[in-house]
Amino acid sequence: MKNWMVIICSFLLAIVIGGCSNISREESQADQANYASEGGTVEEKTVETENKAEITSDPTEQKDTETNSQVTNMSDRMVIYTANLSIQVNSYTDAISSIQHELQTYNGYIVNTNSYSVENELMEGTITVRIPQENFQKFLKTVESESTKVIDESINGQDVTEEYVDLESRLKSKEVVEKRLLEFMEKAEKTEDLLKISNDLAAVQEEIEQIKGRMNYLDNQVSLATITIHIQESKVNVPELENNDLNTWDETKKQFMETLNFVIRAISSVIVFIVGSIPVFIVLGGILIGIWFILKRKRRQQEEPPENKGE
């Protein structure tokens, strides 16, 4: 009898264990079937679940949420500030040095700079800087006070609060989907299901990284204001006395040698002319001598007495 009782109990125990195993396997297969039937709509179901949870939540919590939202809208706005400033200064170099000093004081930095020369050897240029938002107005006033004239100034603000809140909501939703997909991956037994879940998980994680990247960019733009400053130099350049170029003794020697060379060239030219013209001078001299003798003879004839002419 005892042996029969042991056999019966063992048989019943084997039936119970087998039933539990079948139930567990059926649950796993049901989960996989549920994921396959969902066909990538996990995110929609998650959002629906979150919406239902919000609807069924305590009205007091809903009021607190609305209050927090109003605080965000009123006093915690996310605004990207940019400014363009055009100024005149007496010295371009001094203005750049002053801006660099102020940047160190207000924890800012230079993004880029461009300098060039214009008429009358004056300098102009553009410098773009980024400054913490809390020091934005102080830095602008300091730069304006150190200039001789403010030609133009414009300040722009872009409110990105709604975009940032939307990104936060999308990020939470995607993270819930990621967690759900990870749970499905742990329960997956077929290679085909595992590959499909892996592809969906990779796509969701890529979207999460994109959302985080955009949020980091907005955080950076909000925390640091961008200022572009155009600088014009307006000083009057007074030429200095160039003592190095004034050498009286050298200039005197130079002028003396030039004069002496001119005299030597003139004398040389005269000598060349005279020597070269000797044949002409001889002919002209002979003619002039002949004319002189003829004129002298005629004068003698005219001076003789009339008696001598009659004889």
Image: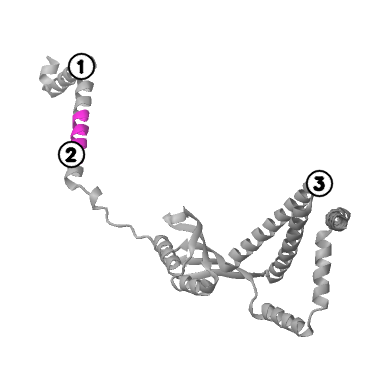
Q: Say what secondary structure mark 2 lies in.
A: helix
**293 on left or right of 206:** left
Residue 104 in the figure: left or right of residue 298: right
For the N terminus, the quadrant is bottom right
Residue 219 is situated, as x and y percent measured from the top left of the image, at 61, 66
* Residue wearing tag 1: 278
Asked if labels 2 and 1 touch by Cβ distance under 8 angstroms, the answer is no
- The majority secondary structure of the magenta stretch comes to helix
The picture quadrant where one finds residue 17 is bottom right
Residue at image location 53% in from the left, 71% down from the top: 136
Q: Earlier in the sequence, mark 1 or mark 3?
A: 3
Residue closer to the observer: 5 or 204: 5
Q: Which mark is residue 256?
A: 2
Dot 1: element: helix
The reply to whether residue 129 is in sight is: yes
Residue 190 - label: 3
- Distance of label 1 from label 2 (alpha carbons): 33 Å
The image quadrant of residue 152 is bottom right
Could you tell which of marks 1 and 2 lies nearer the N-terminus? 2
Is 108 magenta? The answer is no
The type of residue carrying mark 2 is Phe
Residue type highlighted by circle 3: Lys
Residue 75 position, x and y percent, is 64, 80
Tell me which segment is drawn in magenta: 255-266
Residue at image position (68%, 69%) is 160
Are the residues at dot 3 and dot 2 in contact (C-beta closer than 8 Å)? Answer: no
Of the residues shown, which amino acid type is indicated by label 1? Ile
Per the image, is 265 magenta?
A: yes
Depth check, front residue: 94 or 10? 10
How many neighbours does mark 3 have within 10 angstroms: few (below 14), some (14-19), or many (20 or more)? few
